[in-house]
Amino acid sequence: MAGGAARISNSKHQKHDGDEDVYDRISALPNVLRTHILSFLPTKEAVRTCVLSKRWKFAWTSISELEFIEAGVSGTNRRINEQGFEKYVDGVLGRHDALFINKFILQCWCRDFHHQHLPLHVSKWISTAIALNVEELDILVRGLEPVALPPCLYTCGRLKVLKLCGILSLQVPELVCLNGLKILWLQGIMFLEDNSLRKLLSGSQFLDELLVRTTPWNSRSLGISSLSYISSPSLKILKIQDCLGYPETMDHSIVVDAPNMTDLHISIEDARRKCYTVKNSPNLVSAHIEINPSPSADVFVKLLENISHISRLNLLGLTKDLLEVDHYQNVPVFHNLKHLTIEILEGGWQ
């Protein structure tokens, strides 16, 4: 009884509807459990719980997921107003005392003189996340001037998911050690050297999924020589969103060498790509090819020749001209094909 009385006296109670005594079960939970609950909230909401009581004041400082989204960057309602954004992120990271974090999400602007120091802040914030042994890093930076990523990014052994999008520049060193990396997304980022993707993949020996998206606005965006050869012995899923926008004189070819690849997704958003070659892919099962606008028939036929052993094929965005019988005299038979979807833009049938 004495122990029970002590527990009651040390726990919060609230009065509701006269004499009814309501037990505050959440505040009475162990700190570890309350911190785990807060991890399911957006970071800005979790931080706000510090005003509830003394017991809640520091509960958020050990949450395992951190999310910082500046107003106007995306459509989410979890945005933080740009006024004081840098100060807010610095404050949260400065008070955070966990030994590791599972996920770090950062979405921000770098667009004018008000954000002139933001590139340095972004690099510092990413370095802080890496020092906390982050497992998933999701970075989106919009703006005009590229933001350099810190060197420590390339040797983060605990990192499992890396998603980079926007005005980011990568100076990939010769030594890359990302042995824990399983998922890599590169969308419109800037490689400072043409062999950067090769070095990045060679240092990611257990990579399962790769997504790359080229952009037309930057001549060193991932898409020229960086994307000309994709080789990974461990890769299972490859997604290419190809939007070149480069001069006609350049060599627009892509060679994929992935012996363990099972799923291939290609979205051709530039008809000038001269060649797509998929070699050494005996385990390839499924291919999803979306074309807009249509490439030349030779490019399309060559791609089909490389994947004739698959069992599932989706062809989207084709035109009637591309399906002329004369183009396909050399196309091999798909002996293993069990599922075929064809979507044609002109004519209204699928």
Image (spheres, rainbow, N blue to C red):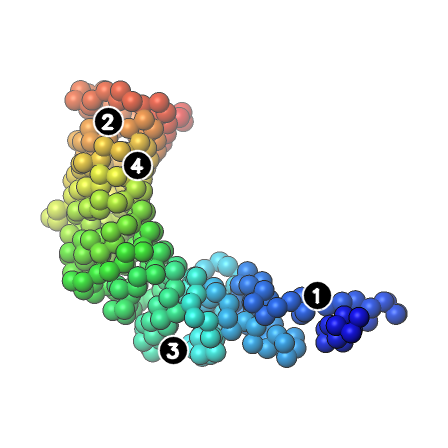
Residue 239, given in percent of the width and then of the height, sits at 31, 44
Secondary structure under tag 4 reads loop
Pair 2/1: label in front = 1
Q: Label 2 is placed on what type of residue?
A: Ser
Q: Tell me the number on the disc at residue 308.
A: 2
Looking at the image, do the residues carrying marks 2 and 1 touch, with CB atoms under 8 Å apart?
Answer: no
Pair 1/3: label in front = 1
Of pointers 1 and 3, the one earlier in the residue sequence = 1
The quadrant of the picture occupied by the N terminus is: bottom right
Secondary structure under tag 3 reads helix
Of pointers 4 and 3, the one earlier in the residue sequence = 3
Answer whether residue 246 is visible to the viewer in this image: no
**Residue placed under numbered mark 1 in the picture:** 25
Residue placed most toward the observer, 125 or 56: 56
Of pointers 4 and 2, the one earlier in the residue sequence = 4
Of pointers 2 and 3, the one earlier in the residue sequence = 3
Q: Residues within 10 Å of mark 2 (few under 14, many from 20)?
A: some
- The span from disc 4 to disc 2 (Cα, nearest Å) is 13 Å
Answer whether residue 237 is visible to the viewer in this image: yes
**Residue placed under numbered mark 3 in the picture:** 114
- Asked where in the image residue 331 lies, by quadrant, the reply is top left
Of pointers 2 and 1, the one earlier in the residue sequence = 1
Looking at the image, do the residues carrying marks 4 and 1 touch, with CB atoms under 8 Å apart?
Answer: no
The residue depicted at 76 percent of the width and 70 percent of the height is: 4
In this rendering, is residue 194 above or below 153?
A: above
Q: Label 1 is placed on what type of residue?
A: Arg
- The span from disc 4 to disc 3 (Cα, nearest Å) is 46 Å
**Residue placed under numbered mark 4 in the picture:** 262
| Relative horizontal placement of residue 13, taking residue 50 as reference (left or right) | right
- The span from disc 1 to disc 3 (Cα, nearest Å) is 45 Å
